[in-house]
Amino acid sequence: MPILTKEQARALLTKVLSYSKAEQCELNLSGSDSGNVRYARNSVSTSGGISTNSLVVSSAFGKRLGVATINEFDDASLEKVVRRAEELAHLAPENPEFMPFLSQQQYGPDSPTFSEATASMGAKERADAVQASLTQAKDNKLAAAGFLSNSAGFSAMMNSKGLFAYNKSTDVAFNITVRTDDGKGSGYATKGYNDFKKLNTKTDTAIACKKALSSVAAKAIEPGKYTVILEPTAVAVMLENLFFSLDARQADEGRSFMSKPGGKTKVGEQLLDERVNIYSDPWNTELPTSTWAGDGRAQNKVNWIEKGVVKNLYTSRYWAEKTGIKSIPSPDGAIMMGGAKSLEELIKGTEKGILVTRLWYIRPVDPQTLLLTGLTRDGTFYIEKGEIKFPIKNFRFNESPVIMLNNLEEMGKSERTVSAESNASYLLPPLKIKDFTFTSLSDAV
Amino acid sequence: MKRRDFIYLTGAGAAAAMLPAIPIFGHDISQERALEYVDPAAKKILSDIALNAARSKGATYTDVRVGRYLNQYVVTREDKVENIVNTESYGIGIRVIANGSWGFAATDKMDKDSIAKAAELAVSIAKENARLQSEPVQLAPQKGFGDVTWKAPIEKNAFEVPIKEKVDLLLSVNDAAIKGGADYINSILFMVNEQKYFASSEGSYIDQDIHRIWPTFFITKIDKTTGKFETRNALSAPSGKGYEYLEARPQDKIKTASGTLYKGRYDMLEDAKQAAIQVGEKMKAKSVEAGKYDLVLDPSHLGLTIHESCGHPTELDRVLGYEANFAGTSFLTLDKWQSKKFQYGSKEVNITADKTEVGSLGAVGYDDEGVKCGKWDVIKEGVLVNYQAIRDQAHIVGLDHSQGCCYADNWSSVQFQRMANISLQPGKKPLSIADQIKNVAKGIYIVGEGSFSIDQQRYNFQFGGQLFYEIKEGKIIGMLKDVAYQANTQEFWNSCVAICDESDYRLGGTFFDGKGQPSQSSAVSHGSATTRFNNVNVINTARKI
């Protein structure tokens, strides 16, 4: 422990399953090794290394379910946790929404979610990467605050109906805010990958430095409706609120932006610009994710929005069976198809507009319209005649991603990015949006 | 547990449906095990193993936290019990200074070898990071307290109350809401017990037992012909109390023209009945006309405004730039404090920090770096007079001691600066809620928490609420909807003109204050009485898609 191979996980789970006396038993096993360095004021502020592992046992008798968890793996402890889950199942009330466990599923080939370079990272590799970032900031006489984290983990499940699933994955994430000493300029960059070799903290810090130096002495311009170019990380925090709302039960129950009067939904309707295509694909080489969901269902390529039409909603197995809709788990990542242009080319083609580096403190205002509020941050610039003319003060916005994706002007090339709100990774393009609604100014830098 | 995780497990919003499935914050355990308390003598032995191992590897300072974190949540919807779970997270976190730099490591393997190895890892991380330091860590002096204990003064341990009693309460709440006209209700009881043991190389061995409880619900009503829907959330405040919080007596209720409010204890059943009526009224409410209004803010609402615009900007780590990459910095820079005349608010505004307020979420005897906790002024008669600091920052503001604001949300998380209970002191002259409303010509009375968002230096904010009542010529004339107010923190607090007296003082707060990287959650309370702010900008949030 904590990172078991597929064969080791299968052997351990087979042994645990042999202890079961329940009508049905399902096991979920996971483990991870992670480390991080956090820095600010050009020095390390905190850092750490954490190892954890866990086994979840779910035992069922009829519609009664008991769940118990343990992180000790000697035979006596493993048998004890199985007995405990069975005792809890006998004590539990019947759950009318309980679904029998799945039999063996077809998951397709393994997804390339694991990188040895990331798994083998230690304190030295993290410190080296942070040193490259700090050197860049110090050379520019700027103050850096950043965070580098890496993790390697595995998950496996097995049940008494013959299901077995395994996946191991790695993740490395880096984000950096660089500020000028007088507090008048701030810039941000973020990157995340499965493979540490793809990360270049020096290059990313250079982007944040450039934005910090360019954003000094920002001018105030009036709030209102503007054409904006949202960089991918700003797109992520707007769109993830839309992704989170594609739940079938909420839509059917009438309490979602996807609901229509009388218990109908807007699935199949043209809700967004016809250039909007959003899907998930576990085998995408840039954003590989697990080929199975935590409840054992297969994760396949799913078109969520095709040519602006919502094609699918995710759902629990219970709700899918009750309503007769397709049973689709929520995905681990989302991909929006983009265009061919770079961010620079989008700027070049803009007569008047605002470049937004990052959005912050996004909160839902109205679930019916998916109206969100939040602010720009760490690099907001006015564009005129294809060039960045001057930095501008930050704005508060009140905007819905549904309205936003109907006001789409142009898309750039999709790239992997990390949400600064949820830390989730996505593959998204920069978007040029007309009539984006800014409602007030902020003096924050 | 993070806010989003809570939303997910409660089914309170589709917004979290892509989040990982539970269990997420510990191992499921039995009810009997949840009632055990680990012997402090055993924790002292484990701590000494870590202290000795770190010292032998070159640590010049070490602190150790042996933490046992218990959660219990009971989740229901309509007539169904969705989840009943007890969880436990038990392990050790070791923080060291070596070569002038911090290092931290944590393990849930509580044997001698694993603890010693974790201590050695913490020292090696510190030494590796030392090359990145511009100057060595400087700690404010702190004497060792020897063996001491602190227990939250609860009357009834929520973990001892039978599950059936909790399920019966929630199902009766749901039944009342549905019978009252609600279409859907999710109700939740969330209980926390932190059993924390702190030991340091300075000679402290501190054992603490902390309890929190949060009963809440989310009601939805749908107009099936139009497809419109409205929601009303519970008016409970998360609280640092035991199960007695749910046993409201007549003296715990404040009867107003708009309904019942709760002081100190909470009547969940009564609130659900009231919510079912009010959510129907919200469906019929008038959409607000944007413009300037005088706002009368109930403590059930004002708590979050205080949290965002008073609590966070006075955290010294934000002022100094430690949160620049995530939660942000602060407009309350050191020069404003040094001037001793920065007018943060009107003369009515007195804000205190208090780590000891009885019944608050943040009440402890000692913080997570072994500092005895207390109370101090942050804003006095509108002027910024102090910040909130921890040991490695105290010297920066000339303090010879820490203010005890260090906290970690788990044994596996490194401790860092978190907010104390930050509260607005009540007015000194007698003033009731009715008096406040009587004095307003054109205004809105806001009850309960809604959407909230503030910029990264805590200037510009926008807040919604649960219930909005239009005030005209001193009287409530009906309910409004689509209301949010936007303001600049300094202008807003300078527009504060009247605060109700001590008799109306109540605690609001949050279970899920997020900060830090990796992000951690902290629970904190904010006291206030009903308060009036003049001439605030209100926007209309209605949209069409």
Image (cartoon, rainbow, N blue to C red):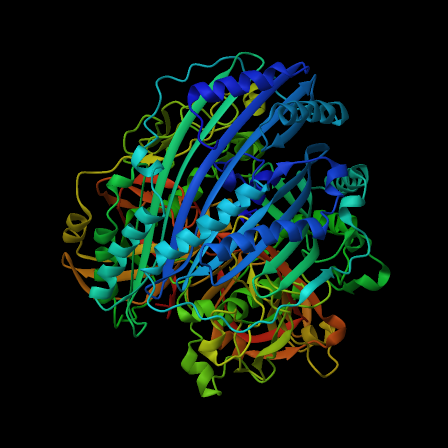
Q: How many marks?
A: 0
From the viewer's perspective, is residue A120 above or below residue B290? above
From the viewer's perspective, is residue B157 above or below residue A5? below
Identify the residue at horizontal 54%, vertical 51% (top origin). B93
Which is more toward the observer, B477 or A131?
A: A131
What x and y, as percent, mark residue A101?
Answer: 58, 18
Q: The C terminus of chain A is located in which quarter?
A: bottom left
Is residue A179 visible in the rendered structure shown here?
yes
What x and y, as percent, mark residue A273?
Answer: 31, 38
From the viewer's perspective, is residue B165 above or below residue A218? above
What x and y, as percent, mark residue B324?
Answer: 38, 63
Instruction: Determine the image quadrant of residue A160.
Output: top right
- Drawn side of residue B422 relative to residue B33, left or right: left
From the viewer's perspective, is residue B77 above or below residue A44? above
- Drawn side of residue B79 relative to residue B295, left or right: right
Which is more toward the observer, B191 or B6?
A: B191
What x and y, as percent, mark residue B422?
Answer: 60, 69
Q: Residue furthest front?
A: B56
- Drawn side of residue B490 relative to residue A15, left or right: left
Is residue A223 visible in the rendered structure shown here?
no
Instruction: Determine the image quadrant of residue B286.
Output: bottom right
Which is more toward the observer, A361 or B445?
A: A361
Identify the residue at horizontal 41%, vertical 18% (top origin). A107
Identify the residue at horizontal 41%, vertical 67% (top origin). B329
